[in-house]
Image (cartoon, rainbow, N blue to C red):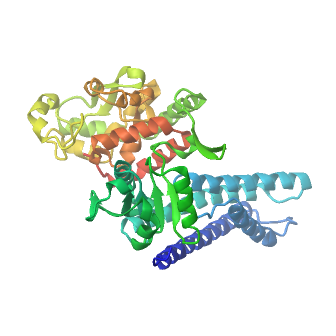
Amino acid sequence: MDAPRSDALVRHLSTRQRAYVRTIAATDFIVIALSVLGGYLARFSFAGPIGVTIPYGVVAPALALTWLVFLRAQRCYEPRVLGYGADEYRRVAGASLRLAGAIAIGLYITDVGVSRGFLAIAFLMGTAGLVTSRWAARKQLHLARIRGEGWSHRVLVVGDAAHVLELVYTLRREPYTGYRVVGACIPDALMAPQAQHLGDVPVVGSFRTIVEAATASRADTIAVTASGELTASRLRRLGWQLEGSGIDLVVAPALTDVAGPRIHTRPVAGLPLIHVEAPDIRGAGKIVKGLMDRITAFFLLLMTTPLILLVAVLIKIDSRGPVIFRQRRVGQDGEEFDVFKFRTMVINADEMMAQLAEQNETNGLLFKMRHDPRVTRIGRVLRRYSIDELPQFINVLRGDMSLVGPRPPLPREVAQYDGDVARRLLVKPGITGLWQVSGRSDLSWEDGIRLDLYYVENWSLASDLTIMWKTIGAVVRSRGAY
């Protein structure tokens, strides 16, 4: 590697990574300190520490420092997990709860009289605060990456032309992840004397000049995707060439849209085999999910009853017709049911649809118009903030729907499904889902289907809670709601 290397760029990115880790650590310490202080005040502020022999002036700071050290020991500050996926949140919450359990056991064994109430409040506040502060920091990091403020890795993609284009599309679809493609290397046989492009990605080299192409394009990451010419020995030699260069080597398998918990790497005969677990479609988790759906829907229905009554009156005043709109939809295993929504259109909306077919603003099997003349005045407000979907809590109580799941399709849509799309029907449709927190009506048909299939294959109770949390922001922003 005699060519000028991108050491300055790598050092710049590494410096920013270290600065981000230090910021996270400092924020964690502030959250922990405030939580410990809050636990002390909540426990002793009214009665006061009368008769207390434990020196909390020493115990509280020691607890805060131990907590921070424990987070570091549990690898909660590794750059590879910061800003990506749910693993960061799981590590922080898991480390905090394990420390709380260890301290509780230790105090029980030693019979030290530290207030259990103080510890319980401190750890509950701290765990929630740590997860929330990490989420806020991640949002700021994502915004910086989207704005192109230097927080992204410069990626050189290596592989066959088709796989290169697929990986480029995947990385650009979610720019907040921090991988910006700056060039591509394709097989020698496809190289031409003149400059080439794959789409708008410049081809900067062949498989013989990967390292030189990386340094010339100032890439700090080489992403290798599928190719018949990239043998195991060739890939191994590439790793050797990159030693000490500061350039990371990542391998993108052809398997996509499979979440981390289903993937396990097993070394067999010197090969890192990727074991992919089957999706949990009918397991015990589904029983728990169904129980949580019904309990949550019941309480949400009670809490929103005043709003539901107010909306019903406004709909009656705004236009003639029923308050509740019933529409036939297809649920799990192809079973049809009536979905309940507040009526947001005029009563002859179906008859008008044929006249508006040419103004459809989406592709695929859906019909969407940003300014649909069939929508009533109050209906526009209800749709903007998803208030029209409140009656669907009744569908959840009846077992037709889930709180989180794929979008409930119409029978005419299902009639045109192929084998892949039909997998959406393996689970109950949801009031919200990945489609709603990712743009709703602004999504293309293909992206909506991709998100639904991803949910079916990779759902978990943790992901459901995450989607419900994100739904609040999606409703407030009302992006894609029309």
Foreground of the two, 157 or 119: 157
Foreground of the two, 440 or 390: 440
Residue 438 in picture, x, y percent from top left = 37, 49
Residue 52 in picture, x, y percent from top left = 85, 65
Q: Residue at x 32, y 58 (%)?
A: 191
Direction left: furthest residue: 355
The total number of labels drawn is: 0
Tell me the quarter of the image containing the C terminus.
Answer: top left
Foreground of the two, 440 or 50: 440
Q: Residue at x 49, y 62 (%)?
A: 138
Residue 239 in picture, x, y percent from top left = 56, 61
Foreground of the two, 248 or 12: 248
Left or right: 468 in relation to 27: left
**Is residue 387 shown above or below 57?**
above
Can residue 84 be seen at all in this image of the molecule?
Answer: no
Can residue 203 be seen at all in this image of the molecule?
Answer: yes
